[in-house]
Image: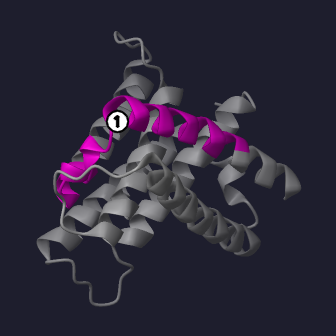
Amino acid sequence: MSNTNTQYDEAIKNCKDIFIKKTKDYGTAWRVLRPISVVDQIFIKALRIRTIQDKKTQMVDDDITSEFKGIVNYAVIGLIQLELNNPQIDELPVEQVNGLYEKYVKFCKDTMLEKNHDYGEAWRDMSQESFADLILMKLQRIKQILANDGKTLISEGIDANYVDILNYSVFALVLMEEGKH
C-alpha cells in the first residue's frame, strides 16, 4: 500500500504542476464552465483515449498519458465548480485554486484508500480500456443526474462520480508509469 501512496502522490503532483502552470497562463477561465461543459471536456478526452486504443494509432501529438492527466484536472475543476456553484467569469487567486485543488485531491485519495482496503487494489489488474470505459460510463451517469436536476433516488451524486473518474485516471497513470499499459 505504501507504494500506492507514493505512486498516487507522484501522479497527482504531475497533474497539479500542469494545472497550476495553466492557471498562471490562463487564469481561471474554466470558472465559466457549466456542469455539462465540464462533463463534455472529460468526455472528449476519454473518447479520444478510447479511439486511440481501438485504432492503435493517433494523429495528434498529445498521448494517452496527457489525456488521463487532463481528465484528472477536469475532474478537479468539476469538484471545485460544484462547491463554488454559479459558474461565471470569475478570476480566482492562484493560492485559492491551489488550496481547492489540494482539498479535492485529498478527498479523492482518502476515498481511494478506503476502497483499496475493501477491494484489495483490484485496479492493478484492470486494463487501460476498462478505465476509459468506466470513465465514459461515469460521465453518462453525471449527464443523467444533470437531466434529473441533480437529484438521485438511491445513487451517489455528481461529486462521487468525479471522484471515481479522477481515481480511475490516476490508476491508469500509475500503471502506465509501471509499464503495464
Residue in the image at 39% along x and 70% along y: 159
Q: Which residue is mark 1?
A: 45
Question: Whole-percent x and y of residue 161?
Answer: 40, 66
Q: Which residues are magenta?
A: 10-39
Viewer-nearest residue: 157 or 29: 29
Q: Would you place residue 152 above or below residue 98 in this image?
A: below
Q: Is residue 98 magenta?
A: no
Q: Label 1 amino acid?
A: Lys
Question: Which image quarter holds the C terminus?
Answer: top right
Left or right? Give the position of 11 relative to 82: right
The chief SS type of the magenta part is: helix
Viewer-nearest residue: 16 or 148: 16
Q: Quadrant of residue 35?
A: bottom left
Question: Whole-percent x and y of residue 146?
Answer: 18, 69
Instruction: Give the number of callouts.
Output: 1
Question: Whole-percent x and y of residue 43?
Answer: 29, 44
Q: Is residue 27 magenta?
A: yes
Q: How many residues crowd mark 1 within 10 Å: few (<14), some (14–19), many (20+)?
A: many
Q: Would you place residue 30 above or below residue 143 in this image?
A: above
Q: Secondary structure at mark 1?
A: helix
Residue in the image at 39% along x and 63% along y: 79
Residue in the image at 71% along x and 75% along y: 118
